[in-house]
Image (cartoon, rainbow, N blue to C red):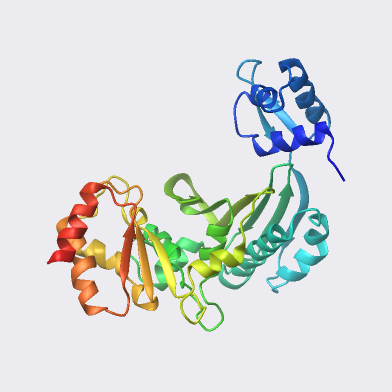
């Protein structure tokens, strides 16, 4: 069935809700007067699809969320799939198949992680929808993901837990889990964040960020969202990291996560921490986005010493600025 003009405008607004001066954008895109564009916006506000903030000239709009699921579990009995089917799946049948599959995967993986790893007495799962995206939160009162990984792998700093999570194949229960859940979920969702203890880990597209929190959060809170207009195919993501046997054999590591705030990547010990568990992969891609310089010893340990002793695990790199690449090339030529 052909959409009406207002439905086309509403869809455009939903896609561009984060932009300022949305009325001007609507007017330009549909060749409408500013008054007509504002009429469409007011109609969406009246229908509780969006809400405005601020004064006329600086007014911005954001989507209004409706709760699909808000459930608290006091027994961790692995019912994530049943909860999804009984309470959420029927509410998102209007979404395309690729998106429904992604949401099912992300929700069940993160809730199952909380059930199996958090040692929590209470886990809360929420799913909310708006005209622009689907928002999922899984929160527990357990031991905290960063501290648990730090303890299990004898890491010096909980920040190193985040670096290890980003590599993939990380689990504190290898007999029952492959360590793929967070790796793929954080990449298939548009936004993915973990808050635990005094740290916050955020991923959006290729941007990775670690921030300190003012308060110490008990347990773990995972928040993730994806646009209802997303064309992402999860199988394409799986294939990017698959080896010849179609298993999870390749990884892409954001090097900036090894760089603590205010510090530089200069030493062999820093390089060795970064290189931990690389031998579990058939290929490693180091992403140097956000790294402005590295030391000679750091580069030498990765691109000469490790490369010579681990010929079965080739290391490639991308997004290196000229100063970083000069150090890498110097190490490769030695």
Q: Nearer the viewer, residue 33 or 279?
A: 33
User: From the viewer's perspective, is residue 94 above or below residue 179?
Assistant: above
Residue in view at x 32 percent, y 60 percent: 317
Q: Residue furthest left?
A: 334
Q: Nearer the viewer, residue 232 or 110?
A: 232
In the rendered structure, the answer to whether residue 129 lies left or right of residue 329 reads: right
Residue in view at x 22 percent, y 64 percent: 269
Q: Nearer the viewer, residue 233 or 107?
A: 233
Q: Does any portion of residue 79 appear in the rendered image?
A: yes
Q: Residue furthest right?
A: 1
Image quarter where the C terminus lies is: bottom left
Residue in view at x 58 percent, y 51 percent: 190
Q: Does any portion of residue 156 appear in the rendered image?
A: no
**Residue 137 pos. (x, y %):** 64, 54
User: From the viewer's perspective, is residue 98 above or below residue 79?
Assistant: above
**Residue 304 pos. (x, y %):** 19, 69
In the rendered structure, the answer to whether residue 333 lies left or right of residue 169 reads: left
**Residue 315 pos. (x, y %):** 31, 68
**Residue 142 pos. (x, y %):** 57, 63
User: Number of callouts in the render?
Assistant: 0
Residue in view at x 51 percent, y 78 percent: 247
User: From the viewer's perspective, is residue 287 above or below residue 22?
Assistant: below
């Amino acid at each position: 069935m052909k959409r009406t003009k207002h439905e086309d405008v509403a869809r455009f607004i939903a896609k561009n809700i984060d932009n300022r001066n949305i009325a001007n954008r609507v007017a330009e895109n549909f060749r409408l007067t500013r008054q007509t564009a504002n009429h469409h916006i007011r109609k969406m506000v009246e229908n509780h699809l969006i809400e405005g903030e601020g004064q006329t000239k600086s007014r911005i709009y954001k989507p209004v969320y409706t709760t699909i699921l808000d459930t608290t579990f006091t027994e961790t009995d692995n019912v994530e799939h049943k909860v999804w089917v009984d309470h959420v799946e029927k509410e998102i049948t209007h979404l395309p198949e690729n998106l429904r599959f992604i949401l099912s995967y992300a929700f069940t993986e993160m809730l199952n992680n909380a059930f199996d790893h958090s040692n929590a007495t209470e886990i809360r799962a929420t799913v909310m929808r708006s005209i622009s995206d689907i928002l999922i939160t899984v929160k527990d009162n357990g031991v905290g993901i960063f501290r648990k990984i730090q303890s299990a792998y004898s890491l010096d700093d909980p920040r190193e837990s985040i670096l290890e999570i980003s590599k993939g194949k990380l689990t504190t229960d290898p007999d029952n889990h492959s360590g793929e859940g967070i790796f793929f979920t954080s990449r298939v969702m548009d936004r993915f964040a973990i808050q635990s203890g005094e740290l916050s880990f955020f991923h959006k597209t290729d941007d990775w960020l670690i921030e300190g929190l003012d308060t110490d959060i008990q347990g773990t809170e995972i928040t993730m969202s994806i646009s209802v207009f997303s064309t992402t195919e999860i199988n394409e993501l799986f294939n990017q990291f698959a080896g010849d046997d179609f298993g999870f054999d390749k990884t892409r590591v954001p090097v900036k996560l090894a760089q603590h705030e205010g510090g530089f990547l200069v030493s062999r010990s820093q390089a060795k921490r970064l290189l931990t568990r690389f031998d579990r992969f058939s290929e490693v891609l180091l992403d140097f986005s956000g790294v402005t310089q590295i030391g000679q010893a750091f580069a030498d340990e990765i691109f000469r010493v490790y490369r010579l002793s681990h010929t079965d695990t080739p290391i490639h790199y991308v997004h290196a600025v000229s100063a970083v690449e000069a150090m890498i090339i110097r190490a490769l030529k030695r």
